[in-house]
Amino acid sequence: MSGSSRSRRPDRRPREAPLFGGVLIANRGEIALRVARTCRELGLRVIAVHSTEDRHSAVARYADEAVQVGPAPARRSYLNIPALIEAASRTGAEAIHPGYGFLSEDPDFAEICEASGLTFIGPPAAVTRLLGDKIAARAVLADEGMPVLPGSREPVPAEEAARIAGTIGYPVIVKAAAGGGGRGMHVAADPAGFADAYRKAQAAALTLFGDGRVYVERYLESPRHVEVQVLADAHGNVVSLGERDCTVQRRHQKLVEETPVPALPPELTRRIAEAAVLGARSVGYVGAGTFEFLVDTDRSFYFLEVNCRVQVEHPVTEMVTGIDIVREQLHIAAGRRLSMRQSDVMPRGVAIECRINAEDPERGFAPTPGPLTGFAAPGGPFVRVDTHCFPGYRIPAAYDSLLAKLVVWAPDRPQALARMRRALAEFRVEGPGVRTTLPFLEEVLDHPLFLSAEHGTGLVGDMLSSGP
């Protein structure tokens, strides 16, 4: 650990007694800055960590104290647990917020934090360990009545997996048991392609997660992807903040999210939300979490996975509910009860989020790192931009390509879409060699299937394969 720096900020008086003496944010980019802002509003001391690559980042300058924890490679900085714990100790932090990605769903990290006298702002390690094992989570929740896709209930070798695939019917998908975030998955359209899909999924599982266990389940070719945001405290209170549609994806990674889910009956989304709350209760969930589901063309829905952290797309829920999800995370971690009951959650209007990535859609969404000579975010009524970028910022090749999240709110979907189109057109990102998803997102919003909410998860692939 090579040093720390303090940024200047105006004096302030906390509106309520501080929850913690200081919160160390074990992350980078837009989510680190977003968490820091809520901590500031709560009167909490903000401690940022950064790699050598990020030493001039927005959050490092914003924080009360910033500590360098290693060189650019994430495994030597943001994934360097001893360095993070030492940074917390040196700065007097009492809690660690992991954001999303990196160590946010690592139960070992949660346990090490607790053993070091630090509050981990997330679910208990035992819950994260259970839900992080996709096979175990699927089995436990199925026993509680959660609908799951037909498939194996345990890790299976290749021959047994092929037999199960033949029984449940093709196409099937082979998934990493320790996977998540759309990684470690391969589809087999027919028996001839199964062996290759199994081999690739197992190799990806070992490479990405250090765990070669895989399982097989029926593959829905172009379903709707619906998720439910839940909050749960340590006193047994669980609420749903409503659902989000995350169907527009590339390589299982989300590009556009919106709430409420368009063109699905309210009765169906209500049942999905109830299933999520029941699932959270059944496993003793504590904190902010997201239960993800697939909805087939016949409107059957199936459990997919649980994300034990704040989601990238959490702002759309905040926009329609007025609830600061990070604030609730901090209160829950401090042992407080939820600040609302289910009857208090009254979503209003429509919110849409577009992820602005430094990627070139014409080259398979290849990352395009480089310096930003210009960066100007849109504004206007009911427009929110979560970003860590600024003119002169250099997009690093070492990390995720997300530059910003553009979120709009309106009373209904047509007005929200019009506002998003206007905001996308205003967004300016310039730099030599830098390409973004902005033009592609404009195409998505004008696609007939998206406009009519008849799209499935295959929309982006179909758009790319059809060409200009």
Image (tube, rainbow, N blue to C red):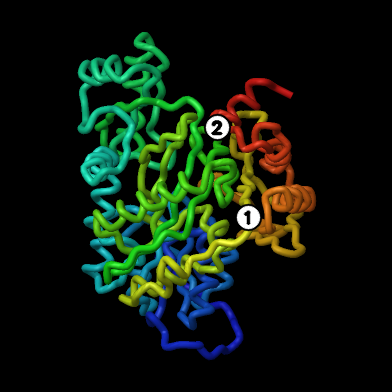
Choose between 133 and 350: the one closer to the eye.
Answer: 350
Mark 2 surroundings: few (<14), some (14-19) or many (≥20) residues within 10 A: many
Mark 1 surroundings: few (<14), some (14-19) or many (≥20) residues within 10 A: many
Pointer 2 residue: 456
Left or right: 239 as drawn, with respect to 284: right
Left or right: 81 as drawn, with respect to 29: left
Residue at horizontal 24 percent and vertical 49 percent from the top: 130
Q: In this rendering, is residue 166 above or below 31?
A: above
In which quarter of the view is residue 88 placed? Answer: bottom left
Q: In this rendering, is residue 263 above or below 403?
A: above
Looking at the figure, which quarter contains the N terminus? bottom left
Left or right: 233 as drawn, with respect to 37: left
Residue 211: x and y, percent? 26, 36
**CA gap, disc 2 to disc 1?**
20 Å
Residue 397: x and y, percent? 56, 44
Residue at horizontal 51 percent and vertical 39 percent from the top: 253
Of the residues under marks 2 and 1, which one precedes in the sequence?
A: 1
For badge 2, the amino acid type reads Gly
Choose between 309 and 234: the one closer to the eye.
Answer: 234
Residue 344: x and y, percent? 47, 70
Q: In this rendering, is residue 204 above or below 371?
A: above
Pointer 1 residue: 350
Choose between 349 and 291: the one closer to the eye.
Answer: 349
